[in-house]
Each structure stands twice: as C-alpha cells, then as structure tokens.
Image: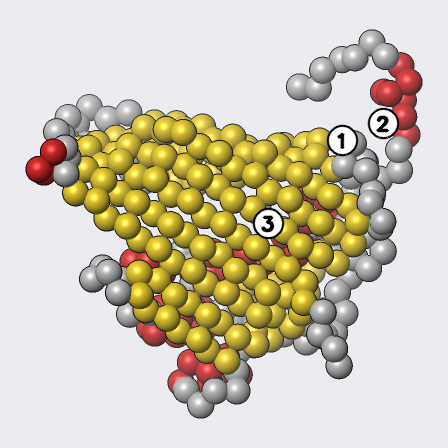
Amino acid sequence: MKALGVLLGATAIVMAATPMVSAQLAEKVSMEAAYEEGDTYRISRTLDLTQSSGEGESAAERTIGASVAFVLRVHSVEEGAKVAIEEIRLSGIKGDGNTARFNIRRSADTPTAKVLREAEISITLNEEGRIETINGYSELAEALRAISGEQSWSAGLASVSGMKGMLEPLFHADGGAIGRRPETGWPDTEEVELPPVALLTFTHNRRLGSLDDGNANIETRTEVSIEQVVSDDPMSPSVELGENEGSSLLVWNVDEGELVERRSSQEIELSWSIGATTINQSQREETVIERLLIEE
C-alpha cells in the first residue's frame, strides 16, 4: 500500500478474427493518478428519499432531501502528505419541513472551521487505486455530525464511508487505474448490507471507449440484485427490490494523469414489510466530481 495526500465508485466468443486480434493487441490506457500541488476539485452529492405507506385516509408520505459539497485542493504530492479541505457545504430538509444549511470555510472564525484548518488527513490506497483508509478524518466527521444536529438527512453524507465513496474515483478511475484497453469492458461489484434482512449487490458494467483528444471516457451502467435473509419469525422485516437504474460517465486526462469530471446517478425503489405494515421507499442519488481551473 502507499499513502498519498491530495486535496480534496463470461466473454462471448466471436468468430471474427480481425476485431478480436485488434482488441487484444490494443495498447492499454494508463489512468494512474499523477496529481500536482494546487489541483482543485469540487465534489458534490445530493440525496432525495421518499417513503410512503398506507392507502386512502391513512396514507402518509415523508420526503428527505440532503446535499453536501467539498472543495478540495492538492497540498502536496509527496507520500504521507496531508489533505487540505477548503470548504464544506451541507444542506438538508429537516423533519419539520424547513431547510437547514451550513457553509464552512477554513478561514471562518468558527469551531468547525478551526477543525478544518487543523485537520491532517492522508489517504491509504491499494495497488488498484482503491481507498483502504482515510487517516485523520474521524474528528472532522464528528464536527460535521455535530453541526448538522444528528439529522437523519445527513446520514452517510458526512461519514468516513461517505467521504471514501466520493474520493475514490479520483484514484481508482472506475477501474482504469490498473490500465485498460480501449473498446473493452469489465464488471465492478459493490455490496450494501440492509441488516438484518437483505444484501444488495450493485454490478457496475464499465466500458472504456476510444481516446478523445487525450481524454479517456468510461461509461457505466449499473444493475442491482438482492439476496434475502430467510427468517422463520413471522414478525421479521423483509424487503423487496423494485425498479432501479444507475449510470455514470468518467472523463480522465491521460496525459496529465488527472480526473476531469465524473457524473453519476442511481435510482432505486424498495418495499419494506413488517407484519401487516408496508413502507415503499424511492431514492435518487447524484454525485458530481469536477476539476476547477484556478488561476494563480
């Protein structure tokens, strides 16, 4: 493993010899990160969740909306260097229907801004560019949870795992960090537990197209499956998977070794049941990572 500091997701047999040979001989495109001091990114995530239950006069509906944005700048490219977080924005719809917003900058004179200024964060990667750990992020995450008042809309957005999911494409490049041949595809799986009733498996079917003016484009279509946990208890909760759709597009500058932009969205419907009660849940999540060109 290596620690990097930066500022801051059966092959068919075809009886056509020429396409197979050209695909096999095509040179791999390297998408290994090579960030430089001063590189700046804005990472934002929005979450919209709707839960409904009952019918007629007993019908009820609850909507939760949340967003978080980070502005990140590369402080150093040396091993063991620290991550500098310039600004954090949080907003969400509280239980009373009102919108709560927080905007924290490093230069502000607030307790949370002080935590931002003093934060020393490094990222440990494996050989594939996946984040193993985010060292030193716990105190900052605790400060974010404190200012959001432990609201349910902030769940997952200010957590260590949430930050990991937002940062990883900067290094993993959706699987391109190990080098991929143009016009080829590969699967990438992710598991999400819904304890104690089920396990969701997200299969991200990725494909690298041809190079476009030095940029590599990776398109992804996501399929979701569910594995139920069997229980003999009639009052044990259960969940069924409904309609779902996910996609993403990552643009990587091969010459500079930097992510240019990544946009992803995931929609999923779940139906929860416990006894005679059923709650239908619809969720949409969007994440955008974009490089900011900052003039010195």
The x, y position of residue 116, in whole percent, is 50, 79
Crowd tier of the residue under label 3, counting other residues whose Cα lies within 10 Å: few below 14, some 14–19, many 20 or above: some
Residue 59 figure quarter: top left
Q: Is there CB contact under 8 Å for labels 1 and 2?
A: yes
Sequence-first disc among 1 and 2? 2
- Which residue reaches farthest front? 56
* Residue wearing tag 1: 184
Q: CA distance from mark 2 to mark 3?
A: 27 Å
Sequence-first disc among 3 and 1? 1
Secondary structure of residue under mark 3? strand
* Residue wearing tag 2: 23
Crowd tier of the residue under label 1, counting other residues whose Cα lies within 10 Å: few below 14, some 14–19, many 20 or above: some
Crowd tier of the residue under label 2, counting other residues whose Cα lies within 10 Å: few below 14, some 14–19, many 20 or above: few
Which is in the foreground here, disc 2 or disc 3?
Answer: 3
Q: CA distance from mark 3 to mark 1?
A: 20 Å
Mark identifier at residue 263: 3
- Which residue reaches farthest top? 15
Q: Is residue 1 visible?
A: no
At a point 49% along the width and 56% down the height, the residue shown is: 45
The x, y position of residue 224, in whole percent, is 47, 31
Inspect the image, locate mark 2, and give the three-letter code of the amino acid beneath it: Ala
At a point 82% along the width and 59% down the height, the residue shown is: 256
At a point 62% along the width and 37% down the height, the residue shown is: 220
Q: Is residue 242 visible?
A: yes
- Which residue reaches farthest bottom? 109
